[in-house]
Image (spheres, coloured by chain):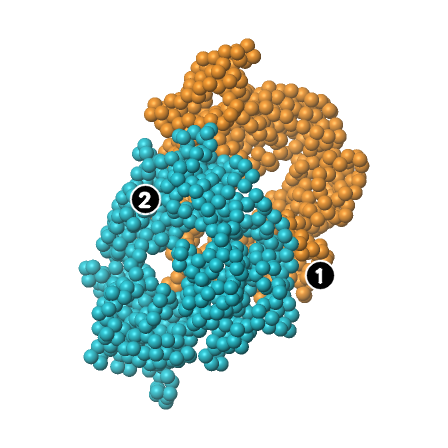
Chain colours: A cyan, B orange
Amino acid sequence: MKARFILSTLALLGIFLFANPSVFQGAPPVTYRIAGIVVDSVTGQPLDGAEVTIAPVAALDDAQTFLSSTGGRFSFTNLALGKYRLMASRRGYATQALLEHEGYSTAIAVGPGLDSEHIRFPLAPSSVITGVVTDDWGDSVRDAKVLLFQQSMFDGSRTLRNINQTMTDDLGRYRFVHLLPGTYAVAVYARPWYTQSPMQYVSSISGKPEENTLYSLAVVEGPVQFPPANQDPLFDVVYPVTFFPGVTTLAEAGRLALAPGATETADFQLRAVPSVHLRVRVPVQPVPVTITTQRQEDGQQTTNQEESSADPAQVSSAPDVALALKIGDGYTEQIETDRKETAPGIVELSGIPPGQVEVNLMAGAIFGGQEDSIVAHGEVFNLSGNTEVDLSAPGDSARVAGSVVLKRSSATAAALSAAPAGKVPPRPAASNVPDQASPDQRYFDAIVQNAQEGLPNVTLSLHSLKTGESYSATVSAQGKFSFAASALPASSYEVEFRPESGLRVSSLEATGATISGRTIEILAGQPVYITVHAAEANCALSGFALKKGKPVSGAMVLLVPQDPGHDMSLYHRDQSDSDGSFTMSAIFPGRYILLAIENGWDLEWADPKVMLQYLPGGQPLELQPGASLTLNAKVQ
Amino acid sequence: MPRCLIPAILFAAQFLFYALPAPAQSSASSSSCPCTLRGSVMDSVSAQPVPHALVRLSAPSPRAVLTDFEGKFQFEGLPAGSVTLEVEKPGYVLRETMGPHLSLPVSVQLAPDPPTAILKLTPESIILGQITDEHGEPLEGFTVAIWSRTFNTSNGEVGLTGSFNAHTDDEGRFRIAKLSPGSYYLLVNPPQSLVQKSSPKSSIPLGYVPIFYRGGDDLSSATPVKLLPGKSQQVNFSLKREPFVRLSGAVSGYRPGDQVTLSLRAAAGVQDPHIVFDPANSSFQTDWIPPGPYTLMAQATSTAAPEASAPSSRSATVLQMVRTLEPSPHSFASQQINAVSSVSDLRLVLQPTLDIPLVVHGLPANDTSVRPDFSPQFFPRLFALIPKFRGASSGEYFSDWENPEDAHAAGDLRMRFSGVPPGTYELLISGLSNASFYVKSASSGTVNLLRENLVLSGSIPPIDVALGSDPATLSGAVSSGNAPVAAVVVLISDTRSKPITFDTGPSGDYKISGLAPGSYRVFATEPAVNPDYLDPAFQQKISSKIQEITLSPNQSASLSLELAAVEE
């Protein structure tokens, strides 16, 4: 059964397969029973007093709960034909779905000839990681931020991901509970208490959009002689981000292997080191800020019209610099710094720990009367000593805009693109030509529109093959997009949709740039207009995982694209349910290989080398746009 | 969530005492500096030195040092004159963490070879405990809120403030540190999600009920926990599930088309439950809620178009607090309910609210000093009616202009309270005293509102406020052992029910203008203490430090005060 958050849609499909009313027409109403025992996954001992909850996969809100009795027994009666998700929880055990793997679990199918009354529900005892954080003198460090990383399979690769965070108490203690058995790493971030003034308050940077496009930066690395002379070295110190056991990167971090029910200890002693000083050159001219009030146009608009027109009033805001520390993969922590504007256009910051630091030039903005601050541009630096960076002028870059054209497969009403399928849309109206309208204005328009309408959930990203940075733009309901806040550095970019967009790039056309497959080469100084031809994820696949003709439950069913590229959204997975059934939907048209692997949940399936031995045993298939295919998978 | 939470203050420190003799004539000695200030920091309870404490010197230029392993520190090369010292260290607190003072700085007069300054830090107190169910099983995710008694120096109100929150962990344990010594009230709030049907057949759900220490569902029945400096106090709770209740009934007394709003208020600190009003049949019903005391309130507002809102140009998105243009409720009802079981026949009959005019006399037409930048679209919070009964819809009702265009008009200030439910109120006046004026009298008919409460029932005479233009001024300095010290200066007058207070800051200097001529009892006390200044027992305790003074019109008097230390 598929991940919980998209379960309902999938479930409908599953129910349809099993509950086609025509099959049972005229039969008296038959009900079914789900029963079994809850056991400790380690000892196998039955567990009394566990809360077992079942819910039809088609209606997860319609849950029933049963408290397991003597012998760990539970039972649910009077159930209609269908599939049910089982969850169980008990004190000392983490809440788990039946045979849960990475959000997938085995649903129980009830129906004629299906055994749903001998379920063994193994509950893994939850584990604990605890520890104490102390400083150079052995004093406890209060209010230190402690980050927990869990090793898990993510997009088919084994990675350490931040899953939780907490603060130390007055004794410097922290405690992560309800952990599933597995491999973990722990990190601590704190500032020495004596370098913080109690009168200092956090200046919050809220509503920071994820899209931060940037100017290329001239970086002067190496020793820079500028720490303020009057700064007392005793207080000009920081704690580096510290991973257990006392190392500074996630790569070096120790792995804590948690056995079921175990308590592991990870203590930290933080060592104060001299703070990194950063000198940032910022634009002397104020950063223009757009105040936007949305005005809805009437519905009779022609296709070339912008979907809304803003009524901007420009104010200006002095540029500000905000820093964020990148800790491990995908976790950033805002850094409170001591900042000083030493000369017009020069900001000096201290109180920065060494490490991966994102330097962001902030600009004020007012959205619908709310004051906000957004990243005008930014860049990540690996800071080990005093550094100077230049955010004051744009580098070699180009303005990029374009439109998305969706190839419609059928009568599916696609909101995207008013242009006829397959044709290049007309060049946009004058106001949309990148050179003329203020790029900042259009960028803010896009944000405001997105926030106010909650619409189109389509995001296009350009992934620089030179720097590895990704730049994103929201696609409007009319299919327009613009990397408007700033220009993109000259580079080769891979053009992709964000996975949640439900779209995939089929081909590209561009003016002002050269195209090679799904890659675009952007040169400095030349405005670029891209036409992105997109395909919709509208195929479905279902069937049974079979081994020698018999259904297998709990198998990992994997749909591998024949031309995967870097796009992990082309892969699909499911866990076969108790009757061996699986369903996948929102699949892009194309050629695939269908695999079912028993005990396959530890495989790094994104690694072609790992999959090499399984691919010959899979079934090749091709999904035409809009296709819904039924195909059984041979379990290996 | 408790209604009022004050963010925890991380580290704070205080001086209980510092030992310095009287400063010599600083003018004579200034030529002998630069001077060295030596000192040490010690724990006020254990009398042990405090190593690695941060000592900050704020004047003449900010400097800081950490104490060594023996708690000693020194600042070299200081010019003669006054310096201000502050000290902090995790694990030590201010005596008062709720008020405006993050720390209580001490001023030191520097002279050659000053004696050692001894700075004492008060160790923090800790409340910890465990919450279990009736079987002794730990309860996780419960919130423990702790409340402390506070004193508002601006209006002299004694109140309770929720200051810290903690959640129980997987073993049902909680721990709240960083507390100042004192008395605290504890409230356990169960997580909302724990309401459960006892069995599929039973219709009444069971859940945990918010509980104050030691038992009781209301702050008034709670017992405070007394915390000593540097001590940990263990407090355990055993809870059991109880049947929840449901309240329903009907509302009457409003006109068709009125906007009717219902709200249900739980005991202080307890989350207010949701209540649904069905206008079709004037009925209301709550969710299943914990049994306990509640205040049920309803108000009706005319839905006739309110006055046209101020034309706002598109670019005028300046962020300001603008006068509310919402109409006041024209009728109101409230009812106290001690819900021990479900009640289905509650009847709320709305009663008309009152509009009370208020006139301020005694303003010379040409004096704009008492009319600061009040433009018509702003809401001048000069006067407030504070309800002295339970069940008011608001904590205070503020006055507004009778006619906003009058804001700039010369002469009397014409104001009005709108939509105030019947009940007993205290009139609070702020911002009307300065070097030129004081509030001479405030009355409604024969009721003297400077001393008595206003009872609203039916129509009452308008409120009449008279300003006097011959105010007295009192100034001076507060000292402790001949050294200046930060303090709160308190003036108590028999003609007013509220004391007048003034925060001196570290210099110990004070100047209070806009005083009504008359007799006052005056004293200075530590800002950290938070006492009820009017409490006879408190006044008895500091009686030797209380001075009496009579101020005549336009007089500028001076009075030196010796700090009245409250704790030994």
Q: Label 1's element?
A: loop
Does residue B146 appear anywhere in the picture? no
Say the numbered circle drawn on residue B305: 1
Quadrant of the rendered structure where residue A73 is? bottom left
**Of residues A563 and A333, the one drawn nearer to the viewer in this rendering:** A563
Q: Secondary structure at mark 2?
A: loop
Q: Position of residue B321 (x, y in %)?
A: 64, 48
x and y percentages locating residue B141 in the rendered image: 38, 52
For the residue marked with disc 2, what is the amino acid?
Answer: Thr
Around disc 1, counting alpha carbons within 10 Å, would you say few (fewer than 14), some (14 to 19), or many (20 or more)?
Answer: few
Query: Label 2 is found on which chain of the structure?
Result: A
The residue labelled by disc 2 is: A248
Q: Nearer the viewer, residue A29 or B455?
A: A29
**Which residue is at a point 71% across and 43% down the rendered structure image?**
B374
Relative to A20, residue B100 above or below? above
Mark 2 and mark 1: Cα distance apart in space:
64 Å
Q: Report x, y in % for residue B498.
A: 62, 34
Q: Position of residue B536 (x, y in %)?
A: 55, 29
> Looking at the image, is A17 positioned above or below residue B69?
below
